[in-house]
Image: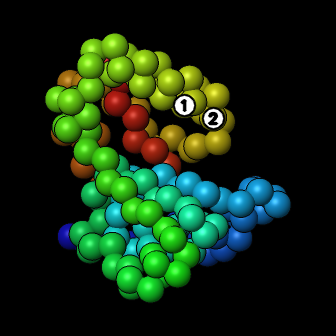
Amino acid sequence: MGRPAGYGLTAHPGWADEVRKAAGSRPVSVAIDPIGGKPAESLLDLLTPGGRLVGYGLIAEEPISVHASTRLNRSLTLRRKNIGRWLSEASAERRGSDGATAKQIALGLKDQFEVAATYGLGELADAVEHAVRQGRVGLVLVRP
């Protein structure tokens, strides 16, 4: 299945300028990437020297391609996080704390994200199909 050039925000022309405008005069020192591939490469251009790209998803079919000089000259750090590793390595207390923090952030920003659809856990296959659907606009949520 072919994928669009960008996903979510990065699919829109001028998205990087919108991010810079939202940041104002503040440097962008961290970008969080759930996609990988070309969209992640575009995020690197937003980062200030010494910035960090933290990726946790692998939706894109292509790899992240970064020339070594880009990382070295700007002292950028690329980190990938794996939820499976986090689940097995983090204590129950840490997982609970991380989950509470994520929920607080999500609730505080809920008006910032368009929701394409909400599915129950019994509809997980439909939710996944919708999440990877070409041309989808907005988040696909799964609720208990």
Q: Is residue 43 left or right of residue 28?
A: left
- Residue 27: give x, y in percent of width and height: 71, 60
Residue to which mark 1 is pinned: 106
- Residue 133: give x, y in percent of width and height: 32, 57
Tell me the kind of residue under disc 2: Leu
* Nearer to us in this view, 55 or 16: 55
* Nearer to us in this view, 65 or 37: 65
Tell me the kind of residue under disc 1: Ala
Q: Is residue 81 visible?
A: yes
Residue displayed at 27% across by 15% down: 92
Residue displayed at 71% across by 70% down: 17
3D distance between C-alphas at marks 2 and 1 = 5 Å
Q: Is residue 136 left or right of residue 10?
A: left
* Nearer to us in this view, 42 or 61: 42
* Colour pattern: rainbow
Q: Residues within 10 Å of mark 1 (few under 14, many from 20)?
A: few
Q: Secondary structure at mark 2?
A: loop
Residue to which mark 2 is pinned: 109
